[in-house]
Image (spheres, helix red, strand yellow):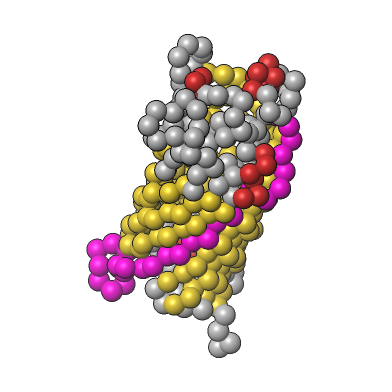
Amino acid sequence: MLALWMGSAWAISGPWVVGERQLNVYTGVDAQRLERLQVKGEGGPDVIDVGEGLSTLGFKGIVTLGVASRFDLEAEIPWYRTIANRPDSALCDALGLKACDTTQGLGVISVRGKLLVLDQIAGAPVTASVLGTGRIGMFTHPTRARITNLGEGTQDLGLGVSVGRDGVVGGQGFFSTYADLGFRYRFPNTRSYPNLQGDRTVPGEEYFGNAELIVSPRLRYGFGALVAGFWRPRGVDFLDLDLTDPDRLAALRVANVRAGGTLIVRAEKGFSASLQVQHTVYASNNPYVTVVTAGVSFQGSLRKD
């Protein structure tokens, strides 16, 4: 439980579970800024400026419930509004299909199950869990062709593993660190996207991973570093897209890695607040984005006693 309380406030991060009939609730605000696209393909520049950028403001709620002593269920529901700061830019005109129209509404909803398989408390060298995730993106289907979209209009299923460790630093401090690695199967929007060789199904499967280290010199506050990324190896490059097809962005072969830092302040009675900043450090056929997230969470028991 100490490792859970020390983790990022935006969800139950890492392999740790909350415990039977325990509850964690998070509400937060995201602010994102996109300024350029790193692209690949035959001819043209490697970087494309997106007018004066895209701006996103979002809200999300995450609820984690301890169904059993070693099994959690978690649900995340986001809402976003994305605008192009210059919808009359040359890129917006070139992309067509209302690429830079303002988009707002529900984002991709996710449901995750986490099963604890190794536990430091029971004498294992690390804590480890198996993760199963389902994401629902049907709400984003009508606007999937836009660069202001909130998703690619698909559903997917994922499997992953999470491994972590926590312990004491000095006499009064603590640390927790973990890494996740997984795979997502994307249910296709189409099986006949043009310009693809061989399998013409889009979007393709994805691989994802993230890692975080939180150090707390005192129990009431902590700080740390994080890195997160994903890779979709099958698809076409941005400059080779069929721009008339609404599934053009789902057809991209993409990669993105973001790095950043986290600050956590813990209050009484299970409340905590967090501030997180991330920035893209590598992108392929994907944007460079700065993300600032602030939120509060509460963790408590459903037991009457």
> Magenta part of the protein: which range?
100-127
Query: Looking at the rendering, which quadrant does residue 204 occupy?
Result: top left
Q: Is residue 285 above or below residue 158?
A: above
Q: Is residue 105 above or below residue 12?
A: above
Judging depth in this view, the residue of 288 and 152 nearest the camera is 152
Q: Residue 264 placed where, x, y %?
A: 54, 54
* Quadrant position of the C terminus in the picture: bottom right
Q: Residue furthest front?
A: 192
Q: Residue 95 placed where, x, y %?
A: 64, 23
Judging depth in this view, the residue of 222 and 251 nearest the camera is 251
Task: Classify residue 1 as left or right of residue 57.
Answer: left
Task: Classify residue 293 as left or right of residue 231.
Answer: right
Q: Residue at x 55, y 47 (%)?
A: 154
Q: Residue 270 placed where, x, y %?
A: 57, 69
Judging depth in this view, the residue of 95 and 216 nearest the camera is 95
Q: Is residue 85 above or below residue 42?
A: below
- Residue 241 appearing in the image: yes
Query: Looking at the rendering, which quadrant does residue 142 occupy?
Result: top right
* Quadrant position of the N terminus in the picture: bottom left
- Residue 216 appearing in the image: no
Q: Residue 116 placed where, x, y %?
A: 36, 68
